[in-house]
Image (cartoon, rainbow, N blue to C red):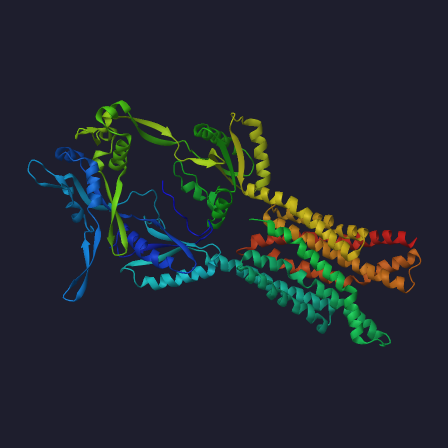
Amino acid sequence: MRTELGPDATSVGWVYQYALRDVSGRHDLSELRSLQDWFLRYHLESVPGVSEVAAVGGFVKQYQVDVDPSRLLAWNVPLSRVLDAVRRGSGDAGGRVIELAGTEYVVRSRGLVSSPRDIAKIVVGEDRASGRPILVEDVAEVAVGPEMRRGVADLDGEGDTVGGVVVMRHGENALAVIERVRAKLAELERSLPEGVEIVPVYDRAPLIRRSIATLLRALAEEMAIVSLVILVFLWHLPSAIVPIVTIPVSVLLAFLPLYALGVTVNIMSLSGIAISIGVLVDGAIVEVENAYKRLHEWAAGDRKADVHAVRLAALQEVGPTVFFSLLVIAVAFLPVLALVGEELRDEMDAHLRLPGIPNIWTMPIRNRIDMLATGVRTPIGVKVLGPDLRVVQEIGEQLERLLRRVPGTRSVVAERAAGGYYLDFVLDRDALARHGVSVADANAIVAAAIGGAAVTSTIEGRARYTVSVRYARDFRDSVRRLRNVLVPVASGGQVPLGELAQLSRVEGPSMIRNENGQLAGYVFVDLADRDPGAWVRDAQRLVADELRLPPGYSLVWSGQYESIERVRERLWTIVPATLLVIVLLLYLSTRSIVKVGIVLLAVPFSLVGAVWLLAALDYNVSVAVWVGMIALMGLDAETGVLMLLFLDLAWERRRREGRLRTPADLVEAVVEGAVKRVRPKMMTVVAAFLGLLPLMCSTGTGADMMKRVAAPMVGGLATSFALELLVYPAVYFLWRKRQLA
């Protein structure tokens, strides 16, 4: 086991990938892999923002000493002596300096191996009969070959290829890193051997640019629509300029905290700005409209008051309420900070089937986010925990059959964790004692002769290649020959391994997972357009009815469902706390519990429209939908506060003028506040509503996420505004009527 530090990156840092193609046919896979490992990798890892460049495919060059055990026996040379000789047969040393004729010379001893011939000439021992030195070439064949590999890379179905995966450092700007990597590759391409070219196979930059372009287009459309709404409703260009100018200024100011916090502009930050475009101008609309109305009344009257005093009074009339309404919206977004995170495949799956390997058709970023969040690379996963891997696998296979029956299941694959095959050498301690062999010596022979031992390495410029010593393939390709592996004994001779151990074929785990201190097996589930939460609930009911777990075994439902559950748990804590803060702010603004209750009536009104529209669009509950719901909560409070503001202004004005004595007077006051001042309320709601429509109608990369953020806001605004116009005035009338009596 070797412990090492991983790269300074996350699972979603995989931003660029390329392949090396040899169009000349003069370079083999080993040469291409060396080019990747010892030339391209070093240059690319020097690019700012790059954490690691991982190589895939090809063959890693290796110097291989293939030992012949019959020749070892003939020369009476144990394998351990060959290992030690090769290890000691390569190296350099320094002899400090020496002065000759007034010149200082650095003394060096140069003994590094650089070719198979150098290794072949290493002395292993001496033949006592003839005095002749025994060389490596006397007991082994030395050649250049590939290291054993456990995977392949293919390019466009044309066969094996070599490539590199560029991994970005944590917290870097992906676009900037990709641009620097492209520039470096273009620079390095001139230095590649003739006929070798670099072929990009994955580049995240186009995805990012398409997503940002979709959002920027929606932003531009929103700004144009909101500006048009303001002009149409006010029909007074000087008054309309103030809220219109508010939009670009507010958007630009929104980037300052992002810059200060080191947050890069991405689809989520731009979506936040997009959904707030219509809300940004609410305060300016109310203030400008109220000033416009008061100045219009001043112009139609005797004009005795100073125009600046009229303007200031109009601002003071609505300013405090507008301030508190915008503060409520800001507080309503706080829970968002607590949130963490095609038919073509049903055809691809049919054409690609590898025994024992599940096909998981998903996008690269989505796949890595799922792995980062839960360790499961599909939308839903079931973790089977218990003490015995064989039983864990049996439970997984039962789940595989059961879960296929749950509606909305596309595919279910259970890991065959216990399906590994082993050749076990069980050492006989009596035999070891009889021959004077320790367990460590026997294990070392098994590891080196069969598995191979990398005893040293060559240095060829910047490249480093290992030198491996092991039995030749012909002497380790069957059970009979493995029993004949020679082990040196205390008497100086060698005995076959079969005399020291029993060799048996057994089955065991192909890999071992550990979860919370227990052995684990995974069941991967891919869904066909169904809400993960609803699917899990149906699956849990089916499993509870038809699967009986042995004592000591348990199931953990994971994947996207686990993330949604974590979000739900956090929201159950944070949303009530946020509502409490909003209620406190509303009370500080209105100084009335009744008014706070009236304002909060907008929340259930808006939920009606939000749920209806989500159901009509067949959107499942997701983090994006929760963001839209949370934003809607703040917007509800704001529209309710503004409606209450105009009702209060009409009440207070008539009360000061002594025109509020009978229920008929109260009706006129409510009509004045609810109907005659409908313009600012219509402007704020229509600006927010129409400002969200470009998001709802957008297409292209990133549009799916934006639509799910905007949908609850659009549906909620429609119903809440209609019900506010119908219900708020009646509730306000009933409340004020009691005070009038």
Can you see residue 204? Answer: yes
Q: Which quadrant of the structure image shows residue 186?
A: bottom left
For this rendering, which residue is in front, 588 or 436? 436
* Image coords of residue 346 (percent x, y): 47, 42
- Horizontally, residue 598 falls left or right of residue 438, namely right
For this rendering, which residue is in front, 40 or 643? 40
* Image coords of residue 25 (percent x, y): 26, 54
Which residue is at a point 68% across and 48% down the rendered structure image?
A: 577
- Furthest-top residue in view? 430
Question: Compared with residue 410, is residue 173 higher up or lower down, i.e. above or below?
Answer: below
- Horizontally, residue 172 falls left or right of residue 190, namely right
Question: Compared with residue 28, is residue 375 higher up or lower down, i.e. above or below?
Answer: above
What is the tally of numbered marks visible in this picture?
Answer: 0
Question: Compared with residue 439, is residue 245 higher up or lower down, i.e. above or below?
Answer: below
For this rendering, which residue is in front, 281 or 359? 281
* Image coords of residue 417 (percent x, y): 42, 33
- Horizontally, residue 451 falls left or right of residue 238, namely left
Quarter holding the N terminus? top left
* Image coords of residue 286 (percent x, y): 74, 64
Can you see residue 295? Answer: no
Question: Compared with residue 332, is residue 520 higher up or lower down, i.e. above or below?
Answer: above
